[in-house]
Image (tube, rainbow, N blue to C red):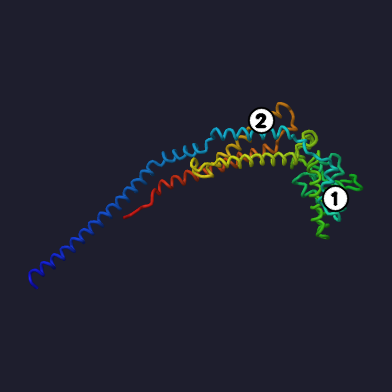
Amino acid sequence: MDLSQELSQLRAEFDGLSRDSQELDSRSDKTLRNMQKIADESNRVADVAHNARQILDDLDREFERQTKLNGLDITFMFFATAIQCARWYILDNSKFRLTWREGDKLMERVVPKNWQDILLASVPYDSVGGHRFRTLGHDPVMGWIFGPANILTNTATKDDLITSYRVRNGAIAEPVPTPQIFTEAYQQIRADKMLLPVAIARQAIHFGSDYFTKQGLPVPFIMTADNDLTKNMLTKFHIDMWSITRGAVLASLVNAIVSYIHALFYDPSKYSSPRVYEVKTRKIIRYSNIIASTSNVIYTAISGDLLRLDVGGILVTLWRIIRDRKFQQEVKREFITESFNELIRGEEYKFE
């Protein structure tokens, strides 16, 4: 090999080594830059961890800012309050009542003709004077136990839980120990299993015929605690299961309408999520319910007009206070946790 060939070979090897060196330098630079990115990200995460308390406080304030009621929300709140107050003032507890005859006719439309002689017959505990507030067959909860037992044994059980009476020809006869009527009822059910569903159906239909009448069904358990209170609630103030249910349903309906309308104003550019915006909606409903129920209690206390005591609406308000506060805490926890995790995660690494 002559000298020129050796020089060419050396030059080629040198060029190769030069290229390898440049590539190695380039890779080293990329590695250093990637390592710097990791170091910078580690420093950022460390800084977030170091200032975690301040960041969490800032997120808490941001959540409160997003869920704070603005002018539009206040308008919704007073609108909802006005409707709720108008509802309990106009529709007092005596409205939309049936007579007992109208209640019976209503049930006749429901029960098939061939069952009416059995299911629409008078129940034995109607034989007691003032039976709506004196017999356990009319208690909306305990009535499901004592009512069928009374029907099966043709008896009536008084509000003291102890005293029961035989009923003959629609009139009260001799007393009988209350445990005995359950023994007799059990014996009848063993003899004919169809008697129990028939007695329950008859109890349900009787509840249905009494539910909407002027002396409706009493509030559960009160008659066993204070019979005079139950009597006044039914006969004077019409505070019974119908007025409570109607008040609760109407209050919930107003709340639902306000909720749907307010949801139409959701702006994704202003709120981090629909759930955060829903906290505002629930605040509007909760505050309006509290104002309306407080106004109702104050009005009835001053005027003495217990016909307008909105027990159903008050129960809905209490339920909203418990339920909505729990919801708000859950959403707040989600908002702060997710936002803090995003800060910890940062941007995805883009290595060279």
Q: Quadrant of the N terminus?
A: bottom left
Question: Can residue 270 be seen in this snapshot?
Answer: yes
Q: Could you say where residue 157 lies in the image, as x and y percent from the top left?
A: 82, 45
Does 21 appear above or below 341? below
- In the picture of the structure, the residue carrying the numbered disc 1 is 120
Q: Could you say where residue 110 lies in the image, as x and y percent from the top left?
A: 81, 51
The front one of 278 and 184 is 278
- Image disc number at residue 331: none
The front one of 166 and 137 is 137
Please report the residue visible at 35 percent of the width from the left and 45 percent of the height from the top. 44
- In the picture of the structure, the residue carrying the numbered disc 2 is 295
Residue 69 occupies quadrant: top right
Q: Residue furthest bottom?
A: 1
- In this rendering, position of residue 345 left or right of residue 196: left
Give amino acid for label 2.
Ser
Q: Residue furthest right?
A: 169
Does 337 appear above or below 183? above
Give amino acid for label 1.
Leu
- In this rendering, position of residue 9 left or right of residue 66: left
Please report the residue visible at 91 percent of the width from the left and 48 percent of the height from the top. 168
Residue 214 occupies quadrant: top right
The front one of 97 and 240 is 97
- Secondary element at tag 2: helix
Please report the residue visible at 70 percent of the width from the left and 37 percent of the height from the top. 311
| Image marks 1 and 2: residues in contact by CB distance under 8 Å | no
Mark 2: few/some/many CA within 10 Å (<14, 14-19, 20+):
some
- Secondary element at tag 1: loop
Q: Quadrant of the C terminus?
A: bottom left
